[in-house]
Structures are given as structure tokens and as C-alpha cells.
Amino acid sequence: MNVILLGPPGAGKGTQARILESERKMIQLSTGDMLRAAVASGSEVGQRAKAVMEAGQLVSDEIVIGVISERLNAPDVTNGVIFDGFPRTTAQAEALDTLLADKGMTLDAVVEMQVDDAELVDRVSGRYTCAKCGEGYHDRHKIPATEGVCDACGSTEFKRRADDNAETVKSRLDAYHAQTAPLIAYYSARGKLKSIDGMAEIGEVTRQLNAALN
Ligand code: AMP
């Protein structure tokens, strides 16, 4: 099964993708993670993407489609893929249709996670992850059981994304509404769209997500 998680920054796409990975042995494909790795490595793609990401704008379709196209050549994608943060423009959605068709893969569902903008700024500006295993936390909503120690792996190192600050979140939300939200109509017209309540507790969102996929 191949699915797209669609929603604004902070909607919980990454959190739910990680849960689907462990429950269904699917593979999370986050273009944000891939681009951050490219920036950290100093590759040509990373150098081209860095300033755009810091400004909270969208990296060019050409770069992002190239990154995802290469990733879809790896053998593990046959386990089923969760697209997280991709596609983000109509051009990317069209490119994905072509890429999947070329590889003999199907798109089973697009799940839109609905969250209010006001909630998103609070969620994104307080979040951080374990530097070792990637488990997600939040200053107010999800703190480790033992302060400073990751619940999942015991690591004591955490990190925050450079673009998770209130000012950049605003640009990222603007980009979502202007460039990504049209995909709701795109996938609805193709009979692929399911919408769930991203404002609920994490476990309830997972329940709704599973119901949408089953
Ligand atoms: P994310 O981790 O999904 O929030 O992405 C972080 C940043 O990476 C975004 O604000 C964009 O600058 C860039 N990015 C990630 N995915 C895409 C995409 N599909 N298209 C364009 N830019 C992207």
C-alpha cells in the first residue's frame, strides 16, 4: 500500500508516518528529511536548497522531484511507502503520478490531516526530536518521562529544526495554503482523498488514519 499524508507543517504527518512504519512495516519517505540530510552533507542539492528552506519557502519542483525519483529506485519501496511532505505542488503531484506508473506502483490513498493554523504555530515552535532515534517531543505537549532522556532509546541528545521558529512557520503556512492546499481538490477529483481530524490526540489520529486506510 502506498499513501500520501497531506497537511500543513505541524499537522503530525511525521509522527503518524513513524507509527505506520512500525505498525505496518511501510517506509516513510520525507522529502524534508532528505533535503535536511543533503544540506548537512553539503551536496550540490543541499547547497541549492539551504537558503530556501531557512526562509520557509518551497524548494524547486525540479530538485524535489529528482530527490524522490532517485529514492523510489531503492528496493525497499516495495514494502509500501508513506509520502510525508511530498507532493507539495500540482507539478509534483503530476510528476508522482508518472513516476509511480513507470515503476508499476499504485497510489492507494491520500489522507488529509486537518488542523487549525493557530494550533500549528504552537505545535511547531515547541517541537524537538531525539538526535539518535528521531522520536518526537514537545515542550508542552509531550515531554520525556525522565527529563532529558529519550523514552524510546535512552539518548540524552535532542535537536530542534532551524526552521521551527514562529516567523518561519508563518512563511511555511503561507506556502502550504498557496501551493499545497490545491492538492486537496486534485486528489478528491481522482477519488483518492480521505480527511481526518489532526487536532485529536496522537492515538486517536492513528485510529482515524487506520480506519481511512482499511
Ligand atoms: P518538512 O520537513 O516537510 O516540513 O520540509 C522542510 C522544508 O523542506 C520545507 O519548508 C521546504 O523548504 C522543503 N521541502 C520539503 N519537502 C518539499 C517539497 N515536496 N517541495 C518543496 N520543498 C520541500
Image (tube, rainbow, N blue to C red):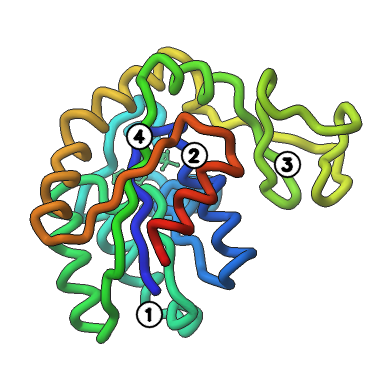
**Foreground of the two, 114 or 11:** 114
Q: Residues within 10 Å of mark 4 (few under 14, many from 20)?
A: some
Q: Label for residue 73?
A: 1
Residue visible at 28% across and 42% down? 59
Task: Describe the element under mark 4 as helix, strand or loop.
Answer: strand
Q: Position of residue 190 (x, y in %)?
A: 12, 61
Please name which of the two marks, 2 or 3, marks the residue nearer to the observer. Answer: 2
Is residue 184 in sight in this rendering?
Answer: yes
Task: Describe the element under mark 1 as helix, strand or loop.
Answer: loop
Please name which of the two marks, 4 or 3, marks the residue nearer to the observer. Answer: 4
Q: Amino acid at mark 1?
A: Asn
Q: Label for residue 12?
A: 2
Of mark 1 and mark 2, the one earlier in the sequence is 2
- In which quadrant of the rendered view does residue 78 lie? bottom left
Of mark 2 and mark 3, the one earlier in the sequence is 2
Q: Residues within 10 Å of mark 1 (few under 14, many from 20)?
A: few
Q: Position of residue 41 (x, y in %)?
A: 54, 52
The residue carrying mark 3 is 130
